Structure formats: C-alpha cells, structure tokens
Image (cartoon, grey):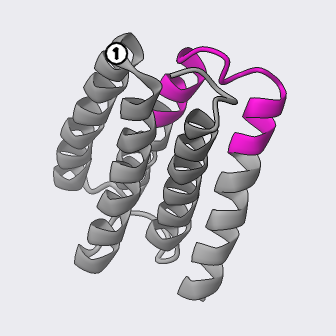
Amino acid sequence: MILIAALVGVVSGAGLIWLMHREGMLAERSGAAILLAAIALFYPVFAAAEGDWLAFALHILIFGGFAFLAIRAYHKSMVLLAGGIIAHGIFDILSGAISAPGPVWWPAFCAGVDIAAGVLMLRLIQTGKIPE
C-alpha cells in the first residue's frame, strides 16, 4: 500500500506542476509559494483531527517554518521554492518513519507529490519554461 501511495503521489505531483505550468500559474512565484505553504498545513490538520494536541503544536511550528521559507523564497527565487517543496518531501519520508499524524499512507503519498513536483519545477526552470 505504501509503494502504491508513493507512486500515485509521484504521478499527482508531476501532473499538478504540469497543469500549473500549462495554465500559467508558475509564470511568477506566488503559485509555487502557495503550494509550499499549503502542503505543509496537512500534518497540523491531521493532528488536530486526531485530537493529539502535542503533535498539533509540533506540526504548527514545522508549518510555520515552511511558511516562512515560502515567503522568503517568494522574494528570492523559484529555485528556492522548488527546493523547499523537495525539502518537504524529505520531511515526509522522515515523518513517516517516526509516526506522523494522519493516514498511514499519507507520508509516502505526500513525499511522492512533493519530490516529483519540486524536481519537475527545477527541470522547467532549467529549460527556461518557467522564470527563475
């Protein structure tokens, strides 16, 4: 189940970035900044839904870090935004190994989404299809 979740995440992440690019949502940095902040918000939501207030507090702090990164990267470069999305994918992998709030398959799915999205964004930047 975890491998399937990761594969679905990869397809979803690549599809999302392709669609955002196709529709012009990555022509400037705000679309990527919103994406980075939004993906970091799922774990606090899962922790709140489970009633785990310690996990909620921890994941709100982590969300704050990714939201801060999204804001700073918005002002600096698309490469930093893509890197932040990939960093969240690495965080997902680590969270899944430790025990993240939410469905057991979520960290693998989200890691697939984040890493595929970030790598595709980097490739689009490298080829000049979205601006730095």
Expressed as whole percent of the image width and height from the top left, the position of residue 92 reads 37, 62
Residue 113 included in the magenta stretch of the image:
no
Q: Is 27 positioned to the left or the right of 92 in the image?
A: right
Expressed as whole percent of the image width and height from the top left, the position of residue 66 reads 30, 35
Give the magenta part as a residue range.
17-36
Helix, strand or loop at label 1? It is helix
Q: Nearer the viewer, residue 23 or 88?
A: 23
Three-letter code for the amino acid on which mark 1 is drawn:
Lys
In this view, the residue farthest toward the top is 75
Residue 16 quadrant: top right
Expressed as whole percent of the image width and height from the top left, the position of residue 11 reads 72, 64
Q: Is 60 positioned to the left or the right of 3 in the image?
A: left
Whether residue 40 is visible to the viewer of this picture, yes or no, is no
Expressed as whole percent of the image width and height from the top left, the position of residue 83 reads 38, 42
Q: For the N terminus, give its image quadrant.
A: bottom right
What's the residue at 29%, 17% (across, down)?
72
